[in-house]
């Protein structure tokens, strides 16, 4: 074999090896770039998801804090209303007691009034029998219809 034949065979053979090696190297490099791009995209997605989650969590915390604030406000309002209701119940009980006492006094006064009116009628009858010809003085206008 001479050098010209060897060179004519080895030249294209080396070119073939170079093309195959370049393809393999390019493929490996392309795969690395694709994997890097996928990894970068995944990281970007994770960051976006993390940011979305952080925003969502922040909104939830704000809503929860606002709900707690409203509950505390309502609890304070309920305590104040409870105090007012208790005071109103005490005033109502006191008024009921005073009303009961007033009714008892009114009943007792009415009973005494009727007894006094009956007694005065008996006195007029007794006086009219004891002192004939004399008439008693007229009753006051407030008692005119009751005697």
Image (spheres, grey):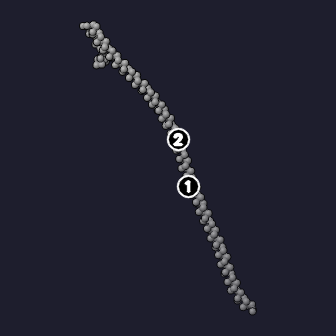
Residue 22: image quadrant is bottom right
Q: Nearer the viewer, mark 1 or mark 2?
A: 2
Q: What element does badge 1 sit on?
A: helix
Quarter of the figure with the N terminus: bottom right
User: In front here: 119 or 2?
Assistant: 119
Instruction: Please report the residue visible at 67 percent of the width from the left and 76 percent of the height from the top.
Output: 25
Q: Earlier in the sequence, mark 1 or mark 2?
A: 1
Residue located 34% across and 16% down the image: 116
Instruction: Please state if 37 lies on the left or on the right of 135 as rendered.
Output: right
Q: Which residue is mark 1?
A: 56
**Neighbours of disc 1 within 10 Å: few (<14), some (14-19), many (20+):** few
Q: Is residue 78 left or right of residue 41?
A: left
Percent position (x, y) of residue 132?
A: 25, 7
Residue drawn at (60%, 60%) of the image: 47
Q: Examine the rendered structure and indicate whether residue 52 appears above or below residue 123.
A: below
Q: Are marks 1 and 2 in contact (CB under 8 Å)?
A: no
Rendering coords of residue 62 (x, y %): 55, 50
Indicate whether 1 appears above or below 59: below
Question: What percent of the width, then of the height, locates residue 42?
Answer: 61, 64
Mark seen at residue 75: 2
Q: How far is mark 1 from mark 2, CA to CA?
A: 28 Å
- Quadrant where the C terminus sits is top left
Q: Which mark is residue 142?
A: none
């Amino acid at each position: 074999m001479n050098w010209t034949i060897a060179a004519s065979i080895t030249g294209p053979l080396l070119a073939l090896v170079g093309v195959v090696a370049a393809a393999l190297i390019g493929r490996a490099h392309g795969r690395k770039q694709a994997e890097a791009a996928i990894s970068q995209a995944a990281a970007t997605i994770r960051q976006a998801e993390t940011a979305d989650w952080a925003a969502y969590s922040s909104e939830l915390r704000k809503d929860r804090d606002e709900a707690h604030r409203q509950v505390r406000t309502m609890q304070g309002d309920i305590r104040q209303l409870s105090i007012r209701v208790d005071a109103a119940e005490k005033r109502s009980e006191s008024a009921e007691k005073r009303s009961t006492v007033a009714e008892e006094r009114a009943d007792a006064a009415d009973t005494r009034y009727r007894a006094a009116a009956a007694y005065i009628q008996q006195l007029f009858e007794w006086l009219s029998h004891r002192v004939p010809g004399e008439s008693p003085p007229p009753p006051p206008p407030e008692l005119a219809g009751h005697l």
